[in-house]
Amino acid sequence: MSGGNNTRVVRVALMAVPALLISLTFLQQRIDVSAAPLQNEKPELMLRSGAMVKKLSLGYDPLLADIYWTRAVQYFGGRVGLRGATFELLGPLLDITTTLDPQLMVAYRFGAIFLSEPAPAGAGRPDLAVELVKKGIAANPDQWRLYGDLGLIYSIHLKDYQKAAEAYLEGSKNPNAQIYMKAMAAAVAQKGDSLETAKLIWGEVYSTTDDAQIKKRARQHLESLDAVIDLKNLNQASEIYWEKFGHYPATIQELRDAGLAEGKLEDPEGYPYVMGAYGVPQLNPESTIVMERDQQLPQRNH
């Protein structure tokens, strides 16, 4: 490259530095102003494109990422808890931060919390949090904890238990992931009433762990899931019995006699199921199987 070309490149770079500094100064001023609780003017971010900021960074990407992350934290901290506060700049700030430094884990993990928590504790935008974490996973596929963060957002804030289970299960495939990822996948699948899926996952947990306490807990879950599935089937049979005879069965044996139930009709510990009020089947009082509250069948009042 000729000396003249080198000179031109240096001049262009030097001309870009003031523009970059002016942009950052403007950004900081706008964020500071937007943190005022009674601010009526909607804040605007001059540079919303992470790619554009990256082009202007002149190779100082990590430094600028730290600056933007700091400003994101300050912006969030200055508004969180304020009545009527909004967080329009939070998403763009986090996007720019993670574009400048795709490996900045703290921005993905804590940024997702800032975005997903409902107001006034956060921005109330779990959809943006999902986008942020997925961006982090795409850039850092070996970071299994990001899958856990994604599963948490889906289960707690979006109530999408299927996607939550899928996220936990995908993260559990990482050889460095802790066993609780599989346990969480099973738990949220169970909460979303994906009982067979939960059984498969808890079965894998039971067969692959060497931890005695985890194995015991997995076995307890498997037993309770088997009982839940049995009781749901018996409950459906009880409804069919009512449609045929105009009343609910008083005992499990009546379902058997009517040809609506067969097999042992007992829980995994060997205790026979019993019939409760209004034909709702239940665990035997002597059984030690523990069912979560959301696993229990609703009681009928007719």
Image: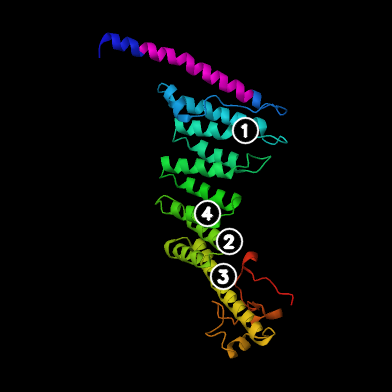
Residue type highlighted by circle 4 = Ala
| Image height of 120 relative to 41, above or below | below
Q: Amino acid at mark 2?
A: Lys
Q: Position of residue 284 (x, y in %)?
A: 63, 79
Instruction: Give the CA separation, mark 3 to mark 2.
Output: 13 Å
Answer whether labels 2 and 4 touch (C-beta < 8 Å). no
Residue at mark 3: 224
Position of residue 79 in the picture relative to residue 27 (left or right): right
**Upstream in the sequence, badge 3 or badge 4?**
4
Given this view, does label 1 or label 3 mark the residue nearer the observer?
1
Quarter of the figure that contains the N terminus: top left
Say which mark, if any, is on residue 185.
none
Figure coloring: rainbow
User: What label sits on residue 76 in the rendered view?
Assistant: 1
Q: Which residue is mark 2?
A: 191
Say which quadrant the C terminus sits in: bottom right
Instruction: Report x, y in % for residue 55.
Output: 42, 24
Asked if the residue at tag 4 contacts the one at tag 3, i.e. Cβ–Cβ closer than 8 Å, the answer is no
Which element type, helix, strand or loop, lies under badge 3? Answer: helix
Q: Residue at x 56, y 88 (%)?
A: 259
Reading the chain from its start, which is encountered first: label 2 or label 1? 1
Q: Please provide the residue range marked out in magenta.
A: 10-32
Name the residue nearer the viewer: 157 or 144.
157
The location of residue 121, given as percent across then percent down, is 66, 40
Name the element at disc 4. Answer: helix
Amino acid type of the residue that numbered disc 3 sits on in the rendered structure: Ser
> Which residue lies at the image location 55% right of the left edge and 73% below the top edge?
229
